[in-house]
Image: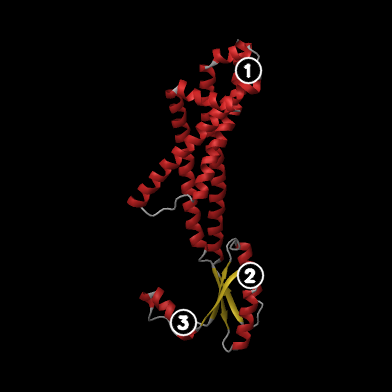
Amino acid sequence: MRLAMREALLAFRRAPLLSALGITTIAFSLFAFGLFGLVTINIRDALRAVEDRVELRAFLVDGTTEDALATAMGDIGAFPEVREVGYVSSDSALVRSREELAEFSDVFDASVLPASIEVRLREGQRDPVTVQAVADRIATYPFIDDVRFGLEWVTKLYAVRTAAVYTGIGLGIVFALVAVIIIGSTIRMAVLARAREIEIMRLVGATNGFVRLPFLIEGTLKGMLGGVLAVGMAYLAHTAVSRMLFETVFFTPAQVGIGIAAGAALGFLGSLLSVGRHLRAVWRDA
């Protein structure tokens, strides 16, 4: 292993321009992947903020007793899907409506705004099926006049979130494959540049594993260095967008570490796929 590591490091010294070109190419490939990741994270946070506004409002019939109300709120709060339950009196509903729709403040009257129970759901429990099921359970109470939550709006929101998730997975796979191909190409150039050296190693009895290991280490190091450079470029892009356009969210330290590790893993995978095929070609032509 020590000899293989030394050979991998010597490869950087023997061909610094080729190594720099390979690292830069990998970095730009991972940078594109990183930009896509940033877009995905910011879209996810934006959708999460919108999803947090999903709520059910159960309107009470006139004359509902405080005991019945307290019992119902306790029961609803115990639902596994429910995060928070609140009571809105007629007066509070009137004040809120006049604040949110000031241009129509003269239209609202306490008599047309009944008291209600507001229900907010937990994260992961805001899909249309779950929301409808909770609404149906709340509607079974005899003093609940109506339950509203904007089914059409919730359905569209969930469809957008689902489309974003699947699009993210698909594009992520594409970017990862591109990175593997690029890394494999850089390793291929390194193998071809050292074809004569590999032939000599074969003549002195070197095994396939002994010949491959330095290239695998080299690919891993290039992927790791490319990942570090890509993270730096992504941070510069994040800073520029935040200053000139709007505030964005950057990767967490854990995500940065995962990104660099992913670069190393892609480097290893690209090397593994490339070096075997091209070593066979070199040895066949030798």
49 displayed left or right of 245: right
Could you tell which of marks 3 and 1 lies nearer the N-terminus? Answer: 3
Of 247 and 261, the residue lying toward us: 261
270 displayed left or right of 38: right
Q: Nearer the viewer, mark 3 or mark 1?
A: 1
Residue annotated with mark 1:
280
Identified by mark 1, the residue type is Arg
- Determine the image quadrant of residue 98: bottom left
Q: As displayed, is residue 163 above or below residue 198? A: below
Residue 60: horizontal and vertical position, in percent?
57, 82
Determine contact: label 1, label 2, CB under 8 Å: no
Residue 120: horizontal and vertical position, in percent?
56, 70
Residue annotated with mark 3:
92
- Separation (CA) of disc 3 from disc 1: 78 Å
- Separation (CA) of disc 1 from disc 2: 63 Å
Of 216 and 282, the residue lying toward us: 216
197 displayed left or right of 231: right
Residue annotated with mark 2:
134
* SS for callout 2: helix
Q: As displayed, is residue 134 above or below residue 28? A: below
Identified by mark 2, the residue type is Val
The outermost residue toward the front is 2
